[in-house]
Amino acid sequence: MDRLAIDLSWKSSQIEGNTYSLLETERLLKERETASGKTKEEATMLLNNKDALDFIIDNTDYLHPLSVSKIEDIHSVLIKELAVERNLRKRRVGISGTNYKPLDNEFQILEALKNTCDLINEKGSIFEKALLALVLISYIQPFMDGNKRTARIVSNAILMNDNYCPLSFRTVDSIDYKKAMLLFYKQNNISKFKEIFINQFELAVKTYF
């Protein structure tokens, strides 16, 4: 699990623009050695990712059933000591590269997130639950920042709750990940993201277990 935790923390942060290399991430997470020329925020993002993953490993059934408050708890771990607002956002956010405009009313955001939790909880397939969490939390953008990182942790927690291996996304190109997400934002087309999800699950089974 150590290898997977390092890979996941590195890749999840890299997708969000973190410039730590995989080797630098390993040194940071194992030895608390920060990389020269990097910001404190980058190190904090990586350490928070590891803390969030450790939390769901230690509490595998925490997100079962899924609820808004539990998603907020995971988000709080991921943004600890970063200049990011906690709790559901009350202001508008924009998504670069698309005309898609997420909900900007906190009551609508809360309702959408509740509906997402209900939808996921009623699904029978664990893979469907995990994939829906991955795309829908990112789509709703319930927080000012840290949405996709939260979605990846929640998705993996759902898999781990049923004893499936989590995804590290290690071999996903960051641009391909963002393109798949933009396709969903623009057209509600999940096909590219489903492809990434399946490929990464197969990789995880072969690599880590």
Image (cartoon, grey):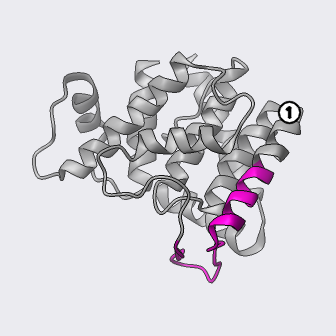
Q: Is residue 61 left or right of residue 48?
A: right
Residue 39: x and y in percent read 18, 53
Q: Which residues are magenta?
A: 91-116
Q: Compare residues 42 and 140 and report the one nearer the observer.
A: 140
Residue at image location 28% in from the left, 36% down from the top: 25
Q: Is residue 37 left or right of residue 128?
A: left
Q: Is residue 111 above or below residue 197?
A: below
Work out which quarter of the rendered image holds the C terminus and state it.
Answer: top right
Q: Is residue 39 left or right of residue 144?
A: left
Q: Is residue 78 left or right of residue 183?
A: left
Indicate the secondary structure of the residue bearing disc 1.
loop
Residue at image location 42% in from the left, 33% down from the top: 7
Residue at image location 35% in from the left, 43% down from the top: 80
Among the 4 quarters of the image, the one containing residue 21: top left
Residue 131: x and y in percent read 73, 44
Q: Compare residues 4 and 81 and report the one nearer the observer.
A: 81
Task: Give the residue pinned by disc 1.
Answer: 125
Q: Is residue 115 magenta?
A: yes
Q: Compare residues 145 and 108 and report the one nearer the observer.
A: 108
Residue 96: x and y in percent read 51, 77
Inspect the image, locate mark 1, and give the three-letter code of the amino acid beneath it: Ser
Q: Is residue 142 magenta?
A: no
User: Residue most toward the left?
Assistant: 36
Residue at image location 64% in from the left, 72% down from the top: 105
